[in-house]
Amino acid sequence: MAAPQTTSPVTLHVNGVAHHREFDHRTTVLDALREHLGLTGAKKGCDHAQCGACTVLVDGRRANSCLLLAVAHDGAEITTVEGLAEGDALHPLQEAFLEHDGFQCGYCTPGQLCSAVGMIAEAGEGAPSHVTPLAAAPPGAPVPLSPDEIRERMSGNLCRCGAYVNIVAAIGDVAR
């Protein structure tokens, strides 16, 4: 009887670059990014998808990379905080976080930024949140991002320093 296969070849397209690797079936996308690809922007906070420090964009949708298995995301397009800027030009959210001091220690900032990019796209596609008023927009129309809407949509990303007011202001400026 042959030993069970414990690794598989996987291709992850990270920040526009294809990475072909052999991963243990238990390797998370977060560990693949940090330990195998050297992209340390996404942070390992709680390792239970409760803090949001590991948030990245997977095929354009925000996701907690600590719970995603790399082998289950073969072929996926992944964007990390390192991929938000275009060369030396910062992403508008990165500029707004700097302008509004939307970070303090900076540990949660990569996850906050990726989550904000995904959240703005979700609202633009008309995806409602728990606080979206029924009369705010017809189904499928962009959802206006009020401070309450931003806070609700970003509630999966924790900041121990308490920079929430500045984060909401930064996202609000970009969303307008």
Image (spheres, grey):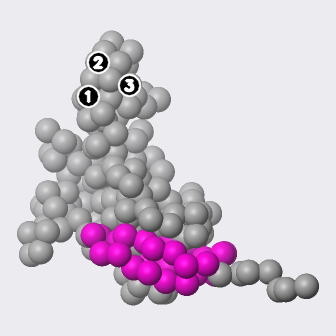
Could you say which is closer to the camera, residue 8 or residue 85? 8
Direction from residue 21 to residue 86 in the image, left or right: left
Q: Which residue is mark 3?
A: 132
Q: Is residue 26 magenta?
A: yes
Q: Which residues are magenta?
A: 8-33
* First-in-chain label (3 vs 1): 3
Asked whether disc 2 touches disc 3, contact meaning CB atoms under 8 Å apart, the reply is: yes
Residue 131 disc label: none
Quarter of the image with the C terminus is: top left
* First-in-chain label (2 vs 3): 3
User: Where in the figure is residue 93, as x and y percent of width and height?
Assistant: 19, 57
Quarter of the image with the N terminus is: bottom right
Q: CA distance from mark 2 to mark 3?
A: 9 Å
User: Where in the figure is residue 113, as x and y percent of width and height?
Assistant: 30, 60
Asked whether disc 2 touches disc 1, contact meaning CB atoms under 8 Å apart, the reply is: yes
Circle 1 — which element? Answer: loop
Residue 142 disc label: 1
Q: CA distance from mark 2 to mark 1?
A: 7 Å
**Residue 171 appears in the figure:** yes
Query: How many other residues sit within 10 Å of disc 2, few (<14), some (14-19) or many (≥20)?
Result: some
Is 121 placed above or below 3 here? Answer: above
Q: CA distance from mark 3 to mark 1?
A: 11 Å
Is 37 placed above or below 47 here? Answer: below
Circle 3 — which element? Answer: loop
Q: Which residue is mark 2?
A: 137
Direction from residue 174 to residue 24 in the image, left or right: right
Task: Please identify the quarter of the rendering in which residue 80 is found.
Answer: bottom left
